[in-house]
């Protein structure tokens, strides 16, 4: 019998894939090569964790037990951004990998130029999808602001210090590349992990909450800008707690990824194993060891759980997903 988290993941994959199928151009849409490359990487498999986290955050904040209309589209947009980052990360100029999700990477299945453009196209389509969400304009702008900051380079310690947020995904990738071969330190590895992986996981959760606050579902009151300002002020603690949950769960996720890279085979991972160790990458186990890394991941999940305590039982799906992050084997 499937566990509750298995059922949650399976349902989330179905919702995400249906939204992606609806939003992505068909393989017969001209020009064929770019659209087939996009679909190759998007539909190559994957756990869909980021869109599922997004949808469950929206469901929790909406407080009705139902998924707000349009939340699956937002989740699909997040998955497009994640897939774009994987396509580019696998390129010869970066990690130079030929296996992703158990399938040939995009530049192997097509070619390098088409892979670069497929990543660009997925990023663009993601923001177009967010702009078309069925929520009030102020909510959509808030989501665009949070997501774009999480993907970019210039926030946190590497840009606008007033945000108090970690650097974005691309900023983290740059630091990761430039530190390759150097002796990893605790500060360096945490900076990279919170940016390269954690930022997108965190915004998945925060954007889901922002969407739920600004939904225009049938039967829900339509908010104007003034009402939105009052709502976000009233729910400032909610967004703060979602962000704390995401930051802790996102770091735990990457720590487990580091451990798996050292302990699992390529077949088990669906990608090339051992590359981080071979390249002397800044990983958590390289600094703290495997057993201490496992303990750190569990402590981070406990902190993530604590952030959601005021939500009671409605937070159970998000908590189960966070726990899954530290028990997965691939």
Image (cartoon, rainbow, N blue to C red):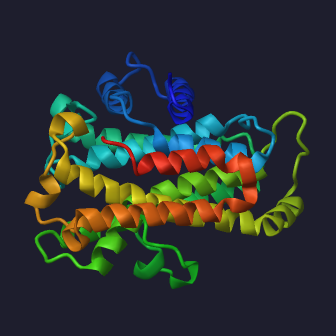
Viewed as shown, does residue 228 lie left or right of 308? right
Please tell me which residue is depicted at 55% across the width and 62% down the height of the picture.
Answer: 304
Camera sees residue 167: yes
Farthest top residue in view: 28
Q: Is residue 203 above or below residue 50?
A: below
In the displayed orientation, state which residue is furthest to the left. 278
Q: Is residue 35 left or right of residue 229?
A: left
The residue at the point 78 percent across, 64 percent down is 235
Give the side of residue 308 with respect to residue 285, left or right: right
Q: Position of residue 184 (x, y in %)?
A: 20, 75
Indicate whether 38 appears above or below 181. above
**In the picture, which quadrant includes the C terminus?**
top left
Q: Is residue 21 above or below residue 256?
A: above
Picture mark count: 0
Residue 249 horizontal/vertical position (percent): 48, 58
Q: Position of residue 99 (x, y in %)?
A: 18, 37
Identify the residue at horizontal 25%, vertical 50% (top origin): 260
Q: Nearer the viewer, residue 272 or 265?
A: 265
Above or below: residue 212 compared with residue 188: above
Quarter assignment of residue 153: bottom left
Image spot of residue 118 (x, y percent)? 33, 38
Q: Nearer the viewer, residue 181 or 222?
A: 181
Foreground residue, 1 or 97? 1
Which residue shows up at 12% across the image and 66% down it? Answer: 280
Task: Tell me if residue 131 can be seen.
Answer: no
């Amino acid at each position: 019998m499937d566990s509750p988290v298995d059922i949650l993941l399976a349902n989330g994959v179905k919702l995400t894939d249906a939204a992606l199928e609806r939003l992505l151009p068909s393989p017969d849409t001209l020009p064929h090569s770019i659209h087939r490359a996009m679909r190759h990487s998007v539909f190559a498999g994957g756990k869909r964790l980021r869109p599922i986290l997004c949808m469950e955050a929206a469901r929790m904040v909406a407080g009705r037990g139902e998924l707000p209309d349009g939340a699956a589209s937002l989740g699909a947009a997040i998955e497009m951004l994640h897939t774009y980052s994987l396509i580019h990360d696998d390129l010869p100029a970066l990690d130079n990998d030929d296996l992703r999700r158990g399938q040939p990477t995009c530049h192997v299945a097509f070619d390098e130029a088409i892979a670069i453009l497929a990543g660009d196209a997925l990023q663009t389509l993601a923001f177009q999808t967010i702009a078309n969400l069925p929520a009030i304009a102020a909510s959509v702008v808030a989501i665009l602001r949070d997501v774009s900051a999480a993907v970019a380079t210039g926030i946190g310690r590497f840009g606008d210090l007033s945000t108090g947020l970690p650097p974005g995904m691309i900023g983290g990738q740059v630091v990761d590349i430039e530190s390759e071969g150097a002796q990893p330190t605790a500060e360096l590895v945490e900076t990279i992990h919170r940016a390269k992986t954690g930022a997108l996981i965190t915004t998945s959760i925060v954007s889901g909450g922002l969407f739920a606050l600004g939904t225009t579902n049938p039967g829900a009151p339509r908010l104007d800008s003034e009402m939105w300002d009052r709502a976000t002020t009233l729910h400032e603690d909610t967004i703060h707690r979602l962000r704390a949950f995401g930051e802790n769960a996102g770091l735990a996720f990457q720590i487990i990824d580091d451990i798996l890279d050292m302990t699992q085979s390529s077949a088990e991972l669906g990608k090339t194993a051992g590359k981080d160790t071979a390249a002397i990458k800044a990983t958590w186990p390289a600094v703290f060891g495997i057993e201490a890394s496992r303990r750190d991941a569990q402590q981070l999940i406990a902190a993530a759980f604590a952030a959601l305590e005021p939500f009671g039982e409605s937070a159970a799906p998000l908590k189960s997903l966070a726990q899954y992050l530290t028990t997965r084997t691939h």
